[in-house]
Structures are given as C-alpha cells and as structure tokens.
Image (cartoon, rainbow, N blue to C red):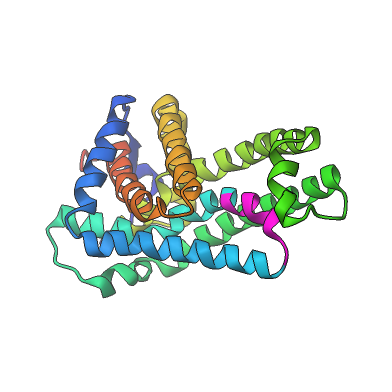
Amino acid sequence: MAAVSLADIRVRPIRSDNVWRWLSAGWSDMWRRPAISLGYGLFVALLSYAVLACLYFVDAVYLFLPLAAGFMFGGPLIAVGLYEMSRRYREGAAFGLPDVLGAVRHAPLQLAYMGMVLLLFALLWIRIATLLFALFFGSSTPPLDGLFESLFLSMQGAAFLAVGTAIGAVLAFAAYAISAVSIPLIVDREVDAMTATIASLASVRDNFMPMMLWAWLIAIFTAVGIATLFLGLILFFPLLGHASWHCYRDVLGMADGEPA
C-alpha cells in the first residue's frame, strides 16, 4: 500500500442526495454478514449498559446524558471494524471475525493519535457538563427518583439543557469535522493522522450542507438508539458504521483520478 500525501487527495463535490445512498449501501453491507455486523452493535449496546450500571453504583446517574452525548466523540473510532468489513466487501476479499477485531493493525499509531484527540474532546465535554451541572444544581445531586423532573420539568433543568446542548453542539461539530472521513481513510490508505484530519476538514468545508445532513442523521440515529434503552444501537451503530465508509469513498478521491 503506497503512502498517501495531502497532494494525492482531492475532495469530490457531492449533493445531499448522496447521503441516502450511503445509508442504502451501509444497509446492504450490514446484511451481508449480519452475525458480525449486528454482533458489533450488540457489543456497543452491552458496553453502554455497563457504563450505565457503573454510574448507578457510584451514584452518578446524572452524568448519563453527558456521557451519552460523549458517545458521539468515540463512535467513529469504535466503528473501525465496520470500516474494515466494508473495505473487504469492496475488494472482494475474504475475512473473518479476527480480521474485523484486528482492524486497528493497519495503522495502530495513527489510529491511536486520532483516539487521543477524540478522547480529549470527550473529557473536555464531560468536564464542562459536570461544571454546568454544579452551576445549575449546586453541589448536591438530585435523587434518582427525581432526576427526570429536575432535568426536564424545572426552570434550572431547562436552562442546563439549553446551555449544555449549545456547548456540546460546538464540540460535537469540531469532533465530527476532524473525524468524518479521516478514520476510514486511515483504515484504507497509508496516511498519517494529520493528513487525514486535514482531508476530513476539507471534506466538511467543501460539502458543508450534505455533510451537515449526514451529521444530523448520525445524531438522530444515535439518539434513538440510546432512547430505546440502547437496543436501537444494535441495529443503528453498524448501519452508521458501514454507511460512514461509503461516505468516505464518495467524498474523497485521489488526485490522479483513482477512487479513494
């Protein structure tokens, strides 16, 4: 696999209609090996249950919403195995579960760099959310049986959610802009994390409306997946992972005319 520089990459102009093709292609990929794809989603759902259980036992359920929102930061990296599956489908190459689970071996260092950046975003968001919670609710947290009322049926809860959503949206957009196509690119090509990040930023800049539509769909599918007590993630996470691969393939190409 030849190394790829920024000069080798070009951003293709796309339309908002392309987004629905990504979902259609992702849906097709998901059902080619449903045991692996849906198993991937099941793992994500079980991981979410484990996090919620930990919050319950340490009496910090109030952090559930910030952590659920923070899921958006780590999702692109967690989906590396799904990108690998779609890459193998495109190449017509055989693969098994070990290949999917070992997808990070293509570029462990570069993926680690991306992981550290996304982790910083997640930690920053959790810190901000914790400070906002203390600002609006004080040092004492609402009891579990009154948490819903405190968050959704009170003035300070509404203010907390409004301010938190605004700040979270800014952080989420920044994280999305640097990871929208960078991680699939790293899985597919020999490219460093900085080059992949710049290519991702250019993709969002040059195709702002289609990429924002895609960001909204990711947010909606993820929110529904979480709202269904994580059961929806079993289906939606692999769907979005496979579709994100097709987003990358559609948006980026090589300067010599070769598809990405």
Quadrant hosting residue 55: bottom right
Q: Which of 28 and 61 is in front in this view?
A: 61
Percent position (x, y) of residue 260? 26, 46
Which residues are drawn in magenta? 59-68
Q: In this view, does 13 lie above or below 51?
A: above
Percent position (x, y) of residue 176? 50, 43
**Observer able to see residue 182:** yes
Q: Nearer the viewer, residue 2 or 172?
A: 172
Quadrant hosting residue 218: top left
- Image quadrant containing the N terminus: bottom left
| Residue farthest to the right, as pictured | 139
| Residue farthest to the left, as pictured | 92
Percent position (x, y) of residue 118? 56, 55
Q: Nearer the viewer, residue 244 or 113?
A: 244
**Observer able to see residue 189:** no
Q: Which residue is drawn at 72% across and 49% down?
A: 147
Direction from residue 101 to residue 66 in the image, left or right: right
Q: Is residue 9 above or below residue 46?
A: above
Direction from residue 85 to residue 16 in the image, left or right: right
Q: Is residue 201 above or below residue 210?
A: below
| Residue farthest to the bottom, as pictured | 98
Percent position (x, y) of residue 194? 49, 52
Direction from residue 104 to residue 124 in the image, left or right: right
